[in-house]
Amino acid sequence: MPPDEARVEALESLYAHQERAIQELSDLVAAQWARIDGLTREVLRLRDELQTVSERVAPDRPPPHY
């Protein structure tokens, strides 16, 4: 095999490995983004729920020392 062909083959192999690695990283980022999005919605839901419970338990009124 001529040296140029060997170099092209090596570059093509490297390119294929990099393409696979990039796709795996892209999939990982997409999965993490979906997880972050879900956790963000859950935190917002819990914040709203806590606020609702707080308002039921202690309505807005000044503390007794005022």
Image (spheres, rainbow, N blue to C red):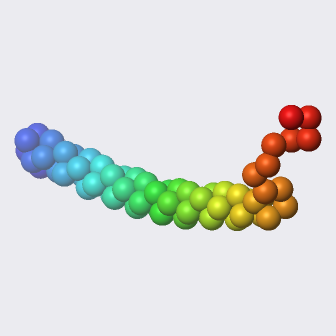
Q: Position of residue 25 (x, y in %)?
A: 40, 53
Q: Residue at x 15, y 42 (%)?
A: 7
Q: Position of residue 47 (x, y in %)?
A: 67, 57
Which of these two is toward me, 49 or 7? 49
Q: How many marks?
A: 0
Which of these two is toward me, 11 or 54? 54
Q: Residue at x 79, y 49 (%)?
A: 61
Q: Position of residue 26 (x, y in %)?
A: 37, 56
Q: Residue furthest front?
A: 66
> Position of 39 compared to 32: left or right?
right
Q: Residue at x 11, y 40 (%)?
A: 3
Q: Residue at x 19, y 45 (%)?
A: 11
> Position of 42 compared to 9: left or right?
right
Q: Quadrant of the C terminus?
A: top right
**Image quadrant assignment for residue 41:** bottom right
Q: Position of residue 22 (x, y in %)?
A: 33, 52
